[in-house]
Amino acid sequence: DTAVSQTPKYLVTQMGNDKSIKCEQNLGHDTMYWYKQDSKKFLKIMFSYNNKELIINETVPNRFSPKSPDKAHLNLHINSLELGDSAVYFCASSQVGGTGGEKLFFGSGTQLSVL
Amino acid sequence: GQNIDQPTEMTATEGAIVQINCTYQTSGFNGLFWYQQHAGEAPTFLSYNVLDGLEEKGRFSSFLSRSKGYSYLLLKELQMKDSASYLCAAMDSNYQLIWGAGTKLIIKP
């Protein structure tokens, strides 16, 4: 079984559309994250949820809205997609709320291309 | 500001040793991570250092000097499968990870 799974793997869409990316982890972790990796390969955290509560909300546009129905799932919904949203989006999880050496487990990524 | 610096790209020969350096500037410090990322794949955890010194794990070792804001990842007996990007990330006082852009390591036969 895949530890952190996200779908879809590839997402190609037109500007202005609304899309969602789903993420599920079966590791029993308390914390889940969304990261964006741009063309320069920098990983930037977007959101973090600890037991269904938002604990980090970096300065991302409010077109991006995370939703966590339970601690095993963290979905990302994006409204009114723009060209600059094209990137790879990674879901990740960790055991505790990032308070130390807890390693991150990443999903396989979603390559989003906005045309 | 907070910053991570690591070389953009390095080339090494199969069977050799390579050292990938990372310098960091963060507001507070709660440890340094190294992750490996193959092209088109997710990053995977390699090591975590919070105390000064060398941590050895098989062919990979990671070193930390907190006073110098410096770390390196040492890869021995290089194999072709080690061709990947190596990401350095420092954890600040708020337990947030600050990521470098990664070092792309190319292994030649």
Image (cartoon, grey):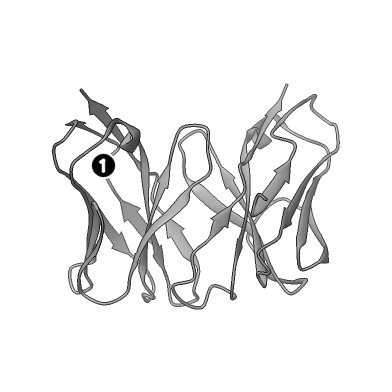
Q: Which of B67 and A93 is in front in this view?
A: A93
**Neighbour class for label 1 at 10 Å: few (<14), some, many (≥20)?**
some
Query: Which quarter shows the C terminus of chain A?
Result: top right
Mark 1 belongs to chain: B
Q: Position of residue B57 (x, y in %)?
A: 27, 60
Residue drawn at x 56%, y 57% as measured from the top left = A105
Q: What residue occupies the far left of the structure in this picture? A: B16
Residue drawn at x 30%, y 61% as measured from the top left = B24
Tally the marks: 1
User: Toward which corner of the image does residue A70 lie, by quadrant?
Assistant: bottom right
Q: What residue occupies the far front of the structure in this picture? A: A1
Q: Which amino acid does label 1 sit on?
A: Pro
Residue drawn at x 59%, y 72% as measured from the top left = A95
Q: Mark 1 points at which residue?
A: B7
Q: Where is residue B52 in the image (x, y as percent from the top left)?
A: 21, 75
Disc 1 is placed on an element classified as loop
User: Toward which corner of the image does residue A55 lie, by quadrant?
Assistant: bottom right
Q: Where is residue B36 in the image (x, y as percent from the top left)?
A: 40, 46
Q: Where is residue A12 in the image (x, y as percent from the top left)?
A: 74, 25
Answer with left or right where residue A50 lies relative to residue B102.
Answer: right
User: Toward which corner of the image does residue B78 lie, by quadrant?
Assistant: top left
Residue drawn at x 53%, y 61% as measured from the top left = A104
Q: Is residue B32 visible?
A: yes
Answer with left or right where residue B9 lies relative to residue A111.
Answer: left
